[in-house]
Image (tube, helix red, strand yellow):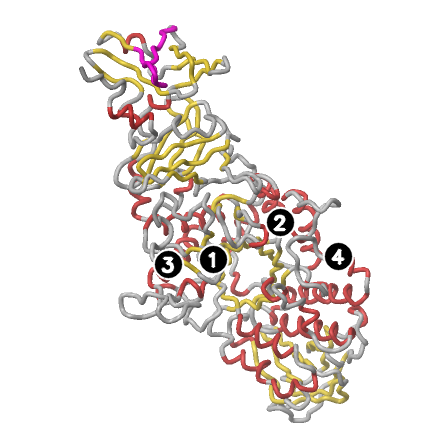
Amino acid sequence: MKKKPLLDPDSTKIAEAKHHDPFSVLSRHLKDNQDQIKVYLPHAETVKLSHNNTVFQRITGTDFFEACFEKGTGKELLPEHYQLSWTDKSGNTHLDYDPYDFPVQLPEFDRHLFGEGKHWHVYQKLGGHLHSADGIKGVLFTVWAPSAGRVSVVGDFNHWDGRCHPMRSLGGGGIWELFVPGLTEGCLYKFEILNRHSNEVLLKTDPYGQQFEFRPNTSSIVVKENNYEWLDHQWLTERTNRNWLHEPMSIYEIHLGSWRRDKLGNFLNYRAMANQLVEYVKRLGFTHIELLPITEHPLDASWGYQTTGYFAPTSRYGSPDDFRYFVDTFHQNGIGIILDWVPAHFPKDAFALARFDGSALYEHEDPRKGEHRDWGTLIYNYGRNEVKNFLLASAIFWLEEFHLDGLRVDAVASMLYLDYSRQDGDWIANQYGGNENLEAIDFLRELNAVTHDQHPGTVIMAEESTSWPQVTRPTWTGGLGFSMKWNMGWMHDVLAYMSQEPVHRKYHHDQLTFGMLYAFSENFALPFSHDEVVHGKGSLLNKMPGDEWQRFANLRLLFTFMFTYPGKKLLFMGIEFGQGTEWNVNKALDWYVLDYPHHRGVQTLVKDLNHLYKEHPALHYYDFDHHGFEWIDCHDVQQSIISYRRKSEHEDLCIVLNFTPVPRERYRIGVPNAGVYTEIFNSDSKYYDGGNIGNGAVLSEPVHWMNHAHSVCLTLPPLGAVILKL
């Protein structure tokens, strides 16, 4: 006689960790006219019901345990949700509610919105969250994995054993769910995923995880409920009503792990960093800081740009509440925070998003669309609703949950072009035969529309280095909808010019003036960013030619040009005091150089330029409008001098810059009105460790010059700039 198998096929699938719906097998069911409770506990020796000590019988040779009741008596004997008292192989006793005794927890409406790509707050639903079901507390785990044949949540609560807590498939949308009663904040977890086609088993972190272990560990951590008491209400109210287009914006770009460290060379906590950094930034007069990505990432050397945790501040510097304190402190001190955010690509780390469920889920299957070969990273499939929703929800998450004031979107050019950094034959054209990534364009437009609608007053900046039109124009006029765009062309031209020996600059004069041809075609920010002081490019100071005095004078001149040129401002940390070495992510800045007068002078100059920029509307009110700028003379090629006016409704400033080390006596420029012109700023001042060549006050003369009825004669300092006000 053929031996009867110990287990039915469904139970065998449970034991082999291959079942997509463990709820159909486990917990209470009617079988053979009896009410039956069936549990699968691989680490149990004995099991009983806690409320009446009903003992479960082990199915011989398996880790299944059953208890049967006569039909009709089960409900009388069992509470709404029963508890299992079980002993493990070490003799320890455990008391748990049965996870498979609870109905579906994730509402159909949330699943529908996610499938449509329209659930802006899906991070509150997907992932691992503290949850209460029928008054019983625990953690609800949900994950999107449509190509999975089985998904289990594993963690420190079940020996990381994928057999213990298989999840339930919620149907064709690809979402899996399991409520595990009794779990609390702080537990570690991952998702174990069995691909239904290849039977490959993958161990993945939670894409929506809001906290992760300190690297190199990668487990997700269940966070506590967000009950942080914010004190930045005034800032948020004012931000909503603020017209940032006409207000000063001077941004200090910072990498938190290498700004400062403690005496042992360890990272500072978010809270300690806040108290030190806010004092420094406030003293130097910056209006905002911009953080290189603090989204969780495994590799320090990526500076955060290879993100694996799109909903989690990195644990390198503390907890999510520590980061909330960081933001809150800045807001209470009147300083905004912008976060570098990376929706253009993600790393191939096996524990994260890459081939998440064994298929190309977040990326494209074809590497011609799905891989950045230069960077060794993967490209998001922006045409897939759930992927687009993941990214849009991440943007909303940082603005809403952490009160951030904006995002700077990295590598936008790589998103816009299908052939970005690719050889012929290594890319796939769009449906019209072009190289435009239509899906990415739609995503960027929706990103800007949604964030501006949900959080008015916040800004979304693009790092975009091509001539793509209307990057900062509204979506309803055909633009991408960004608030601002980095002016990479201006930055490259100006640095190329400044690197020339002064005697040769007259041959490159157009690099100073060309930018004005397109200066108002977009809302530009002028960046001297981290990208200019790494990978062998040297420090900004060492790009300047000449001896030590000339290099520092050139740097002061460069900053004066930047702060008086139309556009918002951005300086990377260390540049503001003329650090001489290239940025090193593995150590703190060279703060010791502030013991030297040249470096202190540059820092003082930046401080004064920031305050000048903020206090004078002529320097910021029309940053994006041609009404705020007028050339006085851009043609003095031989002497490498330019002069221009910056204007607002009630103020007019004259700026003159001398890009040679030759002092110019009685240099005449035309001025708009007669009167006494006062020198309100001089980059050669002794306060900046300069030569102190200047003018004080100058009376205009009725001498027609440069299309003006009046003019003044000035003394121009070598490699210096002056600002005059009537």
Which sits earlier in the primary sequence, circle 3 or circle 1?
Answer: 3
Q: Position of residue 13 (x, y in %)?
A: 29, 28
Element marked by disc 4: helix
Mark 1: which amino acid?
Gly
> What residue is disc 4 on?
591
Q: Residue at x 40, y 33 (%)?
A: 141
Mark 3: which amino acid?
Pro
Element marked by disc 2: helix
Nearer-the-camera pick, 161 or 674: 161
Q: CA distance from mark 3 to mark 4?
A: 45 Å
Element marked by disc 3: helix
Vertical side of 527 occupied by 3: above or below = above
The C terminus, quarter of image:
bottom right
Task: Give the magenta range.
Answer: 53-67
- Mark 4 and mark 1 in contact? Answer it, CB < 8 Å: no
User: Which is the main secondary structure of the residues drawn in magenta?
Assistant: loop
Q: Residue at x 32, y 50 (%)?
A: 385
Nearer-the-camera pick, 586 or 404: 586
Mark 4: which amino acid?
Trp
> What residue is disc 1 on?
376
Q: Residue at x 72, y 73 (%)?
A: 680
The circle drawn on residue 367 is 3
Q: CA distance from mark 4 to mark 2?
A: 22 Å
Q: CA distance from mark 3 to mark 1?
A: 11 Å
Find the residue positioned furthest to the bottom.
Answer: 704
Which sits earlier in the primary sequence, circle 3 or circle 4?
Answer: 3
Mark 2: which amino acid?
Phe
Residue 116 is inside the magenta segment? no
The N terminus, quarter of image:
top left
Answer few, some or many: residues within 10 Å of disc 3's Cα (few below 14, many 20 plus, some between 14 and 19): some
* Front position among marks 2 and 1: 1
